[in-house]
Image (cartoon, coloured by chain):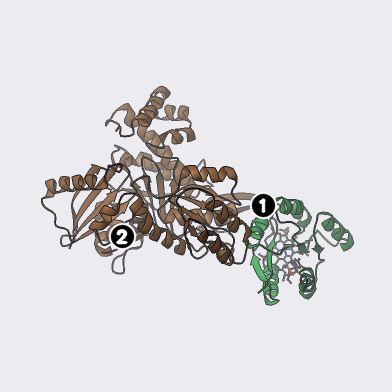
Chain colours: A green, B brown
Amino acid sequence: MNQKTIVTGVIGADVHAVGNKILAYALEEAGFKIVNLGVMVSQEEFIEAAIETNADAILVSSLYGHGEIDCHGLRDKCEEAGLKDIPLLAGGNLVVGKQNFEDVEERFMQMGFTKVYPPNTQLETTINDLNILFGK
Amino acid sequence: MKYLTADFGSTYTKLTAIDASKSEIVGTSTAFTTIETDVMEGYNFALHQLEEKIGEFCYDQLLCCSSAAGGLAMVALGLVPELTSKAAKMAASSAGAKVVRTYAFEISKAEQAEIYDINPDLVLLCGGTDGGNKEVIVNNAKKLCEIDRSFSVIVAGNKSASSDIESIFSDSEKDYVITENVMPEFNKLNIEPAKQKIKELFISKIVDAKGLSKIQNLTNSEIIPTPLAVLNGCELLSKGTEQTEGLGDLMAIDIGGATTDVYSISDGRPTFDNVMIKGLPEPFNKRTVEGDLGMRYSLYSLSNEIDLNALSEEIKVDVKDIVKWIEICKTSPNTLAKKNSIYQTIEEGLAKYALKIAVERHVGKMESTFTPFGQMYIVSGKDLTQVNLIIGIGGVLVNSINPIKILDAAKADKQNPMLLKPKQPNYLLDRKYIFASMGLLSAVDAELALTIMKREIT
Ligand code: B12
């Protein structure tokens, strides 16, 4: 059995709960082991959960527009905590309003994220990407 | 039926004689425990004293608990401080152990040396959810084997690491037992199996090592750690039996010479709206032990936790006298403060802070975070604000002229509204120190134990 473990949650002070539940459900259906931290999750909580469960990826949601600030420094903290090269994925409504997604993606990649998704991404896309990441 | 309960403490042996036909305690006695020589001596002396008071007492069953020789000293190891380390500590504390130190991540050389110095009776090794991190618990197993002490190890971590761990321990001299993970899934607490194993090892290993085997020969019921007996007593008093209702949610606080123990029987769910719950869920029957807060052996460390000048002002006693009292207790821990003396005032002032700090470490906390959209509250730990019964245990409280004044430190205060302490508690006292005895009795006749507790704890 080689089920991959993914930590999910909505970062920062964000309380949008619905998408998180759907996302967790869909990923579980796709065969992953999901450790869902729910809403209002701090960077430290993502990291602690990933260490304890030996997670294969962290999937961060942000819906309320403050995703960029909330995600800042997450990669450094992961490195510090020994989560070397763990894939970090982000999606939802990461920034305020309708910004050019290429710019947003660029900034998130700069922050060390592995994959970044625009609003209205099909969940199949992400599941597909995850399977590629895990070498399936 | 007639029962005799015996509580072997570090300094005293306490006997309680119970007559079931009368539903009452017919007598109690206390004698110095002489653990260095022979516990039987203390026991026989206490029995002699008891029979002098009440005449010959032919009991049908003897029930015993012990915290002799420093109690059940443990260290707990986990992975992340707020997750499996915390779960490990909770499991050991609620099994009645004194958790001397809790470690997280891979332990260092210095920490190995520290464990050597602590020389624990048992070690609880946890880490990783099932299928989660294996590396750290496996390495810690190896590191524990390198420590040249005779402790037994209870392994309650990632099940996927158990075969690796098994081969590490079976190649070593260490005695070990593997049980279910204290945190099988992220943030799911499962402490009962580990608790059960601790209890079994206490009976099979520790009783003998602490010189209690002669006592064990006198009875066919198992000797359990005293704090576990107290916790069982609290649980019974709170929940009641099938026939008789209990007193509902409660807390009990035992201020002792070496430790201050806090018990809470309550689900501790947040009692107000618009909150987020964070952190590890906590047990319904929760016990915490503060090894640095006590009236004798830990008085020095207690005094380091408090502002003695503020205490001096509060109780209107010169700081010099407080310091002097601390010195007296350090050199001769058997000292008792004379009634109505300045030392009693000091003793009670110090007790109040021991209780306050211990309760504040036990209860949950509320944090307010200022989000871009206003204030939100995050709760971690047990919300005990609505618990309306607190029971005081221990000499300082029972002998005090004004125990309420000490107990009031457990109550929520306006300066620290973020600590989820009881808001409007009523206070009762365990005047005859029967909690441990009744906890023991609860295993054989819960109805009787409940009747007596309801009558005697006032
Ligand atoms: C319901 C709602 C609320 C509710 C939330 C209730 C709750 N507890 O869940 C309440 C009223 C509390 C609320 C509050 C606010 N909201 Co609101 N809210 C919405 C609303 C209408 C629906 C959200 C929802 O549930 N959608 C349904 C789910 C299924 O979709 P989803 O959340 O987008 O999630 C999916 C995808 O995004 C994706 N996804 C999510 N995460 C990830 C991660 C990865 C890696 C990937 C690949 C995909 C992915 O998969 C999910 C499942 O399909 C949206 C508008 C909208 N139509 O989306 C606004 C919206 C999200 N809210 C918004 C705002 C601004 C706010 C407030 C700031 C308003 C305010 N000023 O107070 C607050 C913020 C409060 C806080 N601290 O979080 C904005 C965000 C704007 C932005 N990002 O630029 C939105 C877009 C409305 C808008 N058009 O302005 N909100």
Q: Is mark 2 within 8 Å of ligand 1?
A: no
Q: Residue at x 12, y 49 (%)?
A: B54
Q: x, y (%) of residue B422? A: 44, 50
* Subunit that carries the residue with mark 2: B
Q: Secondary structure at mark 2?
A: loop
Question: Residue B440 sits in which quadrant?
Answer: bottom left
Assign the N terminus of chain A to one quadrant of the image. bottom right
| Residue toward you, B291 or B216 | B216
Q: x, y (%) of residue A127? A: 76, 73
Q: Residue at x 56, y 50 (%)?
A: B366
Q: Is residue A110 above or below residue B52?
A: below
Q: Which residue bears the numbered disc 1?
A: B374
A49 relative position to B349: left or right: right
| Residue toward you, B435 or A38 | B435
Q: Which residue bears the numbered disc 2?
A: B222
**Residue at far bottom of view:** A29
